[in-house]
């Protein structure tokens, strides 16, 4: 077997240099027009996509664009799409549809679509045939080649719809324009080998490949030196991280925690089948790692889990939660649940409710099962009636809202360190931040606290947020 986890294929230095040359050529084309140029990006989906968008904006800035958050002002519009559920695809297509009138007003405008949705052949064909005003398209494997794609589109005066590379690789040292100075996404691995039967990710993001620990450490060190206070390590299954110079994820975490500076480490996502005792010990012992764990359950029924190809049972999942809580009693625990997977019976669904009651997650992300073309589950004959799915979804969220409210109310009166993130958009006096467990907190404060961690006394709670006031001892 060709194990790309152990030997990730890099994009070579020559290829990256070539992209720098294309970037310089775009810059020259824009410079010749003697006016500023703006780029706007619309991002759908997960944090990996957010991280990709930050790289695309980094490259756009290198090419001479300035970033705008007003689409109507843009000379270059990008839509970075998600394919995990149909809803995300429809939203991306709807936004893309709305951009048509901008192109009609400004024929000089370039519009490009990228990301997971267009790594699927049928969506690529949709764009080709139904969205003729889209100038260029590239899937997840070609992010690093954005300067070349844009240059070829601009200079060739024709549409460029690129096919993905057959084997996805790792491109290091791309320029990044981060949305925040104090919090950063750091991808540690890409792709997925798990092939859960409902999920499109392995098809659109390719096989698992891990970055070298040295490169990850270099990135984290530079971030911390630049004032970053929180890094979130990203991968579809961080527990199967295996860098050329680092055997596993706990070792990587230990190495990152030895980097000097005052910062917090988070990570996502952990597949329960690969969460090891070493990982739990590492979290319990390393003070820089936030006491927060996102551990997607998907279903509480062992039968459904088997049909999902998750490779753990309800009992194994519960045992893992116990092991985590034994070593880290103050852990904040969150999960993902899919409602209405094919063949899910009332009893199966009740097993999921049972896990919710036993574990008492702090919060959950719940999704209606969405059939994804090309995945095994999309062809299962026993699809669940949409109305039944919605009913179960409401029952699930009603139960979890009660649990979240109870758990949040238990925090009233406590004094907790809160990382101040920013000012409310609607009320200049109100700010928001996150607890170590990543719970949302609202409070009145002063702007100079942004980026700092300050003690706050929790005064009130709803099921989705805490309210607090700065605490002076
Ligand atoms: N790699 C991560 C999550 C990737 S997708 C993991 O394994 O946990 C994020 C979440 O979307 C999944 O955890 C799952 O709950 C949900 N999801 C994925 N495919 C889906 C589908 N076809 N329908 C509904 N939800 C889906
Ligand atoms: Fe999808 Fe499963 Fe891979 Fe997560 S682990 S990305 S749910 S296939």
Image (cartoon, rainbow, N blue to C red):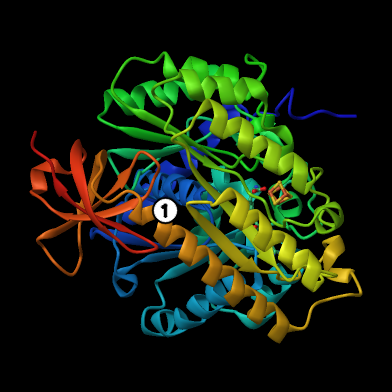
In the rendered image, which quarter contains the C terminus? top left
Compared across the picture, whether 322 is left or right of 378 comes to left
Q: Position of residue 17 (x, y in %)?
A: 52, 31
Q: Position of residue 401 (x, y in %)?
A: 47, 66
Residue found at x 45% / y 44%: 55
Residue found at x 23% / y 60%: 35
Q: Quadrant of residue 71?
A: bottom left
* Ligand 1 within 8 Å, label 1 CB: no
Q: Quadrant of ligand 1?
A: bottom right
Q: Is residue 32 visible?
A: no
Q: Quadrant of residue 134?
A: bottom right
Q: Is residue 130 above or below residue 80?
A: below
Q: Position of residue 73 (x, y in %)?
A: 29, 71
Q: Is residue 149 above or below residue 174?
A: below
Q: Is residue 341 visible?
A: yes
Return the residue at label 1: 407
């Amino acid at each position: 077997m060709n194990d790309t986890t152990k030997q990730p294929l890099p994009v070579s230095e020559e290829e990256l240099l070539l992209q720098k040359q294309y970037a310089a050529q775009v810059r020259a084309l824009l410079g010749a027009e003697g006016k500023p140029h703006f780029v706007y990006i619309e991002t759908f989906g997960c944090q990996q996509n957010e991280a990709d968008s930050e790289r695309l904006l980094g490259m756009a800035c290198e090419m001479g664009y300035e970033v705008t958050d007003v689409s109507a002002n843009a000379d270059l519009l990008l839509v970075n799409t998600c394919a995990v559920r149909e809803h995300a695809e429809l939203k991306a297509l709807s936004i893309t549809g709305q951009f048509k009138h901008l192109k009609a007003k400004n024929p000089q405008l370039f519009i490009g679509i990228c990301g997971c949705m267009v790594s699927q052949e049928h969506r690529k064909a949709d764009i080709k045939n139904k969205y003729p005003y889209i100038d260029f398209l590239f899937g997840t494997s070609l992010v690093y080649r954005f300067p070349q794609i844009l240059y070829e589109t601009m200079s060739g005066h024709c549409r460029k719809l690129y096919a993905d590379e057959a084997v996805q690789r790792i491109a290091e040292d791309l320029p990044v324009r981060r949305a925040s100075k104090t919090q950063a996404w750091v991808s540690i691995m890409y792709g997925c080998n798990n092939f859960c039967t409902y999920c499109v990710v392995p098809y659109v993001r390719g096989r698992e490949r891990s970055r070298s620990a040295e490169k990850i450490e270099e990135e984290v060190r530079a971030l911390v030196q630049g004032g970053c206070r929180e890094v979130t390590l990203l991968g579809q299954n961080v527990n199967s991280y295996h860098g050329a110079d680092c055997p596993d994820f706990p070792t990587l975490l230990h190495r990152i925690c030895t980097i000097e500076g005052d910062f917090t480490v988070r990570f996502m996502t952990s597949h329960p089948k690969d969460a090891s005792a070493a990982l739990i010990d590492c979290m319990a012992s390393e003070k820089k790692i936030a006491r927060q764990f996102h551990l997607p359950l998907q279903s509480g029924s062992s039968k459904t889990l088997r049909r999902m190809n998750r490779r753990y049972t309800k009992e194994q999942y519960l045992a893992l939660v116990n092991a985590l809580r034994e070593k880290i009693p103050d852990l904040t625990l969150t999960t993902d649940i899919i409602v209405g997977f094919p063949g899910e019976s009332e009893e199966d669904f009740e097993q999921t409710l049972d896990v919710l009651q036993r574990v008492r997650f702090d919060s959950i992300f719940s999704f209606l099962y969405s059939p994804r073309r090309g995945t095994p589950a999309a062809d299962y004959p026993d699809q669940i009636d949409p109305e039944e799915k919605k009913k179960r979804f409401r029952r699930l969220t009603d139960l979890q809202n009660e649990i979240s409210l109870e758990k949040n109310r238990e925090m009233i009166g406590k004094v907790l360190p809160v990382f101040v993130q920013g000012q409310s958009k609607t009320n200049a006096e109100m700010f928001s931040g996150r607890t170590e467990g990543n719970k949302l907190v609202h409070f009145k404060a002063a702007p100079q606290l942004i980026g700092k961690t300050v003690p706050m006394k929790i005064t009130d709670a709803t099921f989705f947020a805490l309210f607090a006031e700065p605490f002076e001892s």
